[in-house]
Image (cartoon, rainbow, N blue to C red):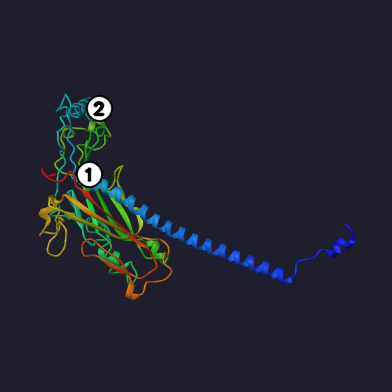
Amino acid sequence: MSKKKFSQIRGISLVELLIGIVITSIMMTAMYTSYTVVNKTYSQVSERAKISRSSRDLVSMLMRDIRMSGFRYYAGTHTISKFASDTQSATGLECDAYPNGMLLSKTSYLSFDNGFTDAGESHNPIVIRKNTLGYASVSVDNPESQTDLTAKMPQGYADDQCCDQIQIVYEDFNQNNLNQPYQKYRITYFAEPNEDGINAGDPRFAVYKTIESWQQPRAPEPVDPDDYDDLTCVFPATGSWSDDCRDCVVKELIRDYITDMEFIPFDSKGRIIKDASGQYPAPEITGIRDRLFDIRGVDIRLTFRSSDDFFKKDAPDSKKRIITGLDNRSKEYSDKYLRDSVIVTVNTRNIGGELFR
């Protein structure tokens, strides 16, 4: 190419360069804005999904346990024969009083305590305690009271209505446990302030679970077979609750960021079972505890909040965000968190007719 042709090639003018920069800037701004919107939308969808997942998981556990409440195990002919054979041949567990093995009763021999004297010993299928934090109201051995738990929350949270407590009891059977084939479990779901959140400046509640087992064995684990006497052939008349068993847990964290957990018992006609003060049947409430076995179903409402800010700004006082409860239990919020509820009804299939005891 000749020098003349090179001299005829024209470059980009300053105006053209500025126009290119402006167009590129507009495109980059549009792309960034789109990314921000998509990212914000994704974060909101993700927060909603977290709340939904937390609610769904907890509801599944509650539904299973509530449906099991009041369950009694009935041993069949095969089970009774097998227990007799096993107690006849088991080294150290056989007894002279029954050379053909122990005769297992068709229904559970485990004792029943209505908890009217000591609520901590209750065997009632379902007990719901309204606006009750922690496990203190059930076990006298728990050092934390309602006042202690509420005092952990900063000012403004002390009057929070979270949450109800539910206690569930049902039986089971373990044919391999020759000392105590009939089993009984007590599961308690309750909420407490999450101390990790409080220490991090994010005061909130969490759901916990405690599982206890009723211990009423005919004999302790054998140490020396020669130490056994005829008492190993007799099931004791009473026992005690214990959290020391294979399936037991104590204050196991189930789900975090709970805002409210509400349980409402109703009878066979769909009417809410409560006294004039709004309390539900519990062994320590004398006016309505006789209706503990009238419970035919439980309405459940679980309300969780997002772990991060969801809204751009706090709600004004005139337009606070309202979470509606089931039994005259609603609350307004003005912070930036998203709150969502799930509501289900669970039938108690094993309560009614023949008493649990």
Q: Secondary structure at mark 2?
A: loop
Query: In the figure, 185 relative to 270: above or below?
Result: above
Q: Amino acid at mark 1?
A: Met
Name the image quarter holding residue 355. Answer: top left
Residue 300 appears in view? yes
Kindly identify which residue carries mark 2.
Answer: 90
How many marks are shown on the rendered structure? 2
- The kind of secondary structure element at disc 1 is helix
Name which residue type carries label 2.
Ala
Q: Nearer the viewer, residue 222 or 288?
A: 288
Q: Quadrant of the N terminus?
A: bottom right
Q: Position of residue 252 (x, y in %)?
A: 33, 52
Look at the image and tell me whether residue 157 can be seen: no
| Local crowd size for mark 1, using a 10 Å CA cut-off: few (<14), some (14–19), many (≥20) | many
Give the camera-side residue of 197 and 306. 306
Seen at 40% across and 54% down, the residue is 49
- Where is residue 46 shown, x and y percent of the image? 43, 56
Q: Quadrant of residue 68?
A: top left
Residue 71 at what x, y percent from top left?
A: 19, 42
Question: Within 10 Å of the Cα at label 2, are there few (<14), some (14-19), or many (20+) other Cα atoms?
Answer: few
Say which mark, if any, is on residue 172. none
Q: Earlier in the sequence, mark 2 or mark 1?
A: 1
Q: Identify the image quadrant of the C terminus.
A: top left
Q: CA distance from mark 2 to mark 1?
A: 32 Å
Residue at image position (12%, 61%) is 275
Q: Which residue is mark 1?
A: 68
Is residue 99 toward the left or the right of residue 204 in the image? left
Instruction: Residue 146: give x, y in percent of width and height.
Output: 25, 64
Q: Is residue 42 above or below residue 238?
A: below
